[in-house]
């Protein structure tokens, strides 16, 4: 789509040493406002049983920033993971609850 831009967090804001140099106020104001002004966050959950982004504080902060600004959060799974997730919804919902409990 024309006019569509992608922001990759790791390339836009360093998540290591530079991140530690920013004061907490910057993260709760400037960074959060930037996420909100972008308007949309795509969260790729893989593997669905133990999604890596939900184990990282940085990713959780981005999700929280998205939610608190009213930006749209789209959750996506790779095709094979989507099929396995759908099967679990029907046949093994306890595995979904267990995955969520580990966040």
Image (spheres, rainbow, N blue to C red):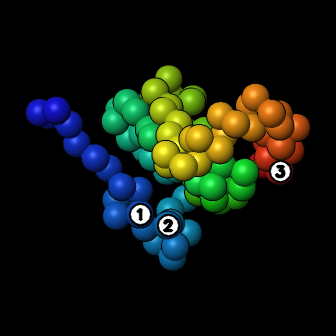
Which of the numbered marks, if any, corresponds to residue 10? Answer: 1
Residue ID at (41%, 56%): 9
The N terminus lies in quadrant = top left
Q: CA distance from mark 2 to mark 1?
A: 6 Å
Asked if the residue at tag 1 contacts the one at tag 2, i.e. Cβ–Cβ closer than 8 Å, the answer is yes
Q: CA distance from mark 2 to mark 3?
A: 23 Å
User: Which residue in the structure is indicated by mark 2?
Assistant: 15
Tag count: 3
As helix, strand or loop, the secondary structure at mark 1 comes to helix
Residue ID at (66%, 49%): 48
Q: What crowding class fits label 2: few (fewer than 14 Cα within 10 Å), some (14-19), or many (20 or more)?
A: few
Q: Earlier in the sequence, mark 2 or mark 3?
A: 2
Residue ID at (83%, 50%): 102
The x, y position of residue 52, in whole percent, is: 63, 59
Q: Quadrant of residue 36?
A: top left
As helix, strand or loop, the secondary structure at mark 3 comes to loop
Pick the front one: 79 or 65:
79
| For residue 6, side relative to residue 103 (left or right) | left
Is 78 drawn above or below residue 13 in the view shown?
above
Is 42 drawn above or below residue 90 in the view shown?
below
């Amino acid at each position: 789509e024309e006019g569509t831009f992608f922001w990759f967090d790791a390339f836009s804001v360093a998540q290591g040493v530079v991140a530690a140099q920013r004061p907490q106020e910057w993260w709760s104001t400037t960074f959060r406002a930037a996420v909100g002004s972008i308007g949309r966050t795509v969260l790729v959950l893989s593997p669905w049983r133990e999604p890596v982004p939900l184990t990282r504080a940085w990713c959780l902060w981005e999700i929280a920033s998205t939610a608190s600004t009213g930006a749209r959060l789209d959750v996506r799974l790779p095709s094979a993971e989507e099929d396995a997730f759908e099967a679990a919804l029907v046949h093994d919902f306890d595995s979904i609850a267990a995955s969520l409990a580990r966040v």
